[in-house]
Every structure is written in C-alpha cells, then in structure tokens.
Amino acid sequence: LRLLSTARVLEKERLYLLVKVFGSTGLSVGELPRLTAEALDGRGPSPVRLPPPLAEELRGYAARQGITAGPVFRSRNGQPMRRTQVTGEIRSLCRDARVAEEKANPRCLKHLWQTTRDGFRAQLDWMVEQACDGLLEAEQLSIGWDSREVRGP
C-alpha cells in the first residue's frame, strides 16, 4: 500500500499501475508484454484475469498515452518494457516509499498476491465446509433423525 500511495503522490501513474498489476493479478514480468490494448478491449487474449476496476484503470491509462495497439507498458521509445527496467523503476519507488527493495520487486509482489489468494481460498473452503455441515444437521433434524440419540439393541 505504501508503494501505491507513494507512486500516486509522485504522480507516477505507470509505476502505480505496474505495482497494482503485479500485486493483484499474479502476472510475471515475462508476461507483461502480452498485456496489450487489444486484451484490455476484449479484442485479444489476456495473459491473466484482470479485476474489472484494474482493467478500467489500464484502459484509461492506455487512452491517455495514445496506446491503441500493442503492449500497454512501454519504454520512452515505444518498445515493451524490459525486465530490468520494470525492476529498476519499482526499486526506485521503494526508496521513496521506505520499503525494503528486497520486499518489493515484481516477484515479491506476485508472491504477495499468491499468498493472499491462497488465504482467501482456505477461508472459503472452511466456510463451505461449515455450510455443508449446517445443511446436513438441518436435514437430519427435519426428518426426525437425531444422531445424538442413543438407541438400544
């Protein structure tokens, strides 16, 4: 969150969106060039599922940058951003955001997303189990079967 708020304060929209993409989609740096204007508009395949608010932010960014085709994230000369450029820019943001550089590179942001996703899935699995247990108990009570009753021989 400090990376995002610092990028916002420094008005570094591209960097803000890069951090958001890595932290909320699990996209790897190698897949970044496949995140294209066509994919955002539904005219081509997307390398990941983008949350709708993020997709809208990326469409707005592409429109403001005049990007109608090809990779959304580009260098100054219009080429897809290289891995070293992406990592370097995020590291420079780390200094301003007072975040340890080793904790805020694309790989760590992807790991954060994976850990968060796995936590949600575990919680959801637990909730499904609880709901199933409750339904089974309600069904047993509705048909008059109480498993707590001890029946004699």
Image (cartoon, rainbow, N blue to C red):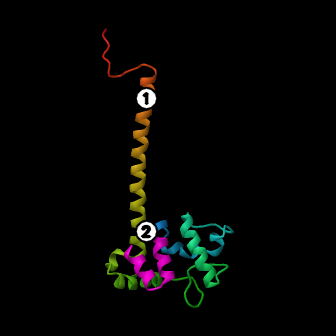
Residue at the location (44% across, 81% down)? 7
Residue at the location (47% across, 72% down)? 20
Q: Vertical placement of 10 versus 150: above or below?
A: below
Tag 2: residue type? Lys
From the image, tell me which residue sits under label 2.
Answer: 110
Provide residue 146's location: percent of width, then percent of height: 37, 21
Seen from this angle, which residue lies furthest right?
43
Provide residue 42's location: percent of width, then percent of height: 66, 67
Range covered by the magenta-colored residues: 1-22
Q: Provide the secondary structure element on which disc 1 rests.
A: helix
Seen from this angle, which residue lies furthest bottom?
77
- Is-magenta flag for residue 11? yes
Dot 2 crowding, Cα within 10 Å, few <14, some 14–19, many 20+: many
| Figure disc tally | 2
Q: Nearer the viewer, mark 1 or mark 2?
A: 1
- Is-magenta flag for residue 71? no
Q: Which mark is residue 138?
A: 1
Left or right of 151: which side holds 86? right
Magenta segment, principal secondary structure?
A: helix
Work out whether residue 33 or residue 55 is closer to the camera in this orientation and state it: 55
Among numbered discs 1 and 2, the one appearing first in the sequence: 2
Seen from this angle, which residue lies furthest top?
153
Q: Which mark is residue 65?
A: none
Dot 1 crowding, Cα within 10 Å, few <14, some 14–19, many 20+: few
What whole-number distance in Å separates the C-alpha atoms at marks 1 and 2? 42 Å
Which quadrant holds residue 1?
bottom left
Residue at the location (38% across, 61% down)? 115
Provide residue 9's location: percent of width, then percent of height: 43, 83
Tag 1: residue type? Ala
